[in-house]
Image: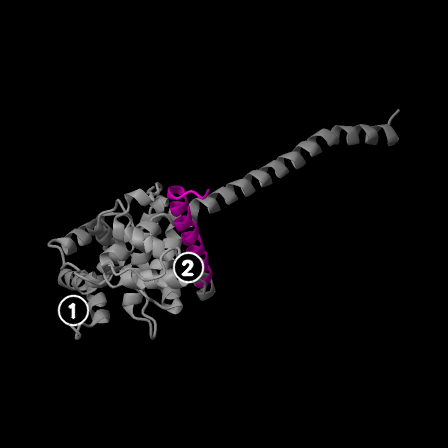
Amino acid sequence: MNDFDQRWQVLARKAGRLLDESLPGLPPGLAARVLARSREAPVESWEDLLGALSLRAVLVTTCLCLVCAGWAFSEWYEVRIERPALERSMTRELPLPWP
Amino acid sequence: MSEAFDVQTCIGRVRNGDQWASRALVEHLHPLVRRLVRNHLPRRESEEDLVQEAFIKVFQKLDGYQPRDGIPFEHWVSRLTVRTCLDALRAERVRPEWRMADLGENEAGWLDFLLSRQAVEPASSSADAQAIVTRLLALLSAPDRLVLTLLDLEQRSTLEISEITGWTRAMVKMRAMRARFKLRQIARRVMKNDFPEP
């Protein structure tokens, strides 16, 4: 532990002495408000889900989806371009069964 | 808080829609939730509002709670409350800005002490110490602030923090180390701005 960390511990211990002091009692009506709100609010909204997933995870997923979509499109596009050339060469090389 | 309070029975009654049991549960948990919220309260958030929000989450998720051997219900509640506070801290996008000139004499004394300019521990009150700690922690990110409050101010063990936050013990230690490093940089920056080196 370096000098800063030791001094920080001294400061934090001194500050921590006040943490448990003077906690107020139960505010009137808190239980009733909590019960009413917990019944009316949805358990987990899509915003909560987004928050839980975090923005970074959503961004990474979006980027992966875009890369996959781009790769799939390029594959599909290549196939579309190449097929006529392949068909042309096939028809040139293969002997036709009719005159 | 009564020692004879049977949490599991009370939870069962709450699940069956007993309003008196719900009130008793709120009364039983209030000191625990209040203390956690107070220690991890964002600057602009009302303590009462965040306590209420934490309790709402507890009641909404109560059906999903499964009692496990050796793990008291209060741990589950602590975890939900800390997560609620962490979300509120993360939502606080704007970090406060302050300079040495904004500090009182005693707060400045503590900052001097922290950066070794003053070798002796200041004789000022715990309130001054808490004021400078609050100012410094407010400049950290939400997880950094959370881990230092739990570890250094509340003096909890890494195991306890791991249970409350869901982080591994190694992660708790690493976060705390990094958070203290950032704290030192912040304190130095504040000091440097007011006493620029020649």
Q: For this view, does B96 lie left or right of residue B171?
A: left
Image location of residue B147, percent across then percent down? 38, 59
Q: Residue at x 15, y 64 (%)?
A: B24
Residue named by callout 1: B1
Residue named by callout 2: A4
Q: For this view, does A69 lie left or right of residue B113?
A: right
Q: Residue at x 71, y 29 (%)?
A: A81
How crowded pointer 2 is (Cα within 10 Å; few <14, some 14-19, many 20+) is rated as some
Q: Is residue B136 visible?
A: yes
Q: Nearer the viewer, residue B1 or A72?
A: B1
The N terminus of chain B appears in which quarter of the rendering?
A: bottom left
In which quadrant of the rendered view does residue B69 lie?
A: bottom left
Q: Secondary structure at mark 1?
A: loop
What amino acid is at disc 1? Answer: Met
* Residue B136 sits inside the magenta stretch: no
Image location of residue B115, percent across then percent down? 39, 55
Is residue B36 positioned above or below B42 on the image?
Answer: below
Numbered disc 2: what chain? A
Image location of residue B45, percent across then percent down? 25, 46
> Seen from this angle, which residue lies furthest front?
B198
Q: Residue at x 85, y 28 (%)?
A: A92
SS majority, magenta: helix
Q: Nearer the viewer, mark 2 or mark 1?
A: 2
What amino acid is at disc 2? Answer: Phe
Q: Residue at x 31, y 66 (%)?
A: B75
Image location of residue B123, percent across then percent down? 25, 61
User: Disc 2 versus disc 1: distance between alpha carbons?
Assistant: 40 Å
Q: Nearer the viewer, residue B198 or B124?
A: B198
Q: Secondary structure at mark 2?
A: helix
How crowded pointer 1 is (Cα within 10 Å; few <14, some 14-19, many 20+) is rated as few
* Residue B189 sits inside the magenta stretch: yes
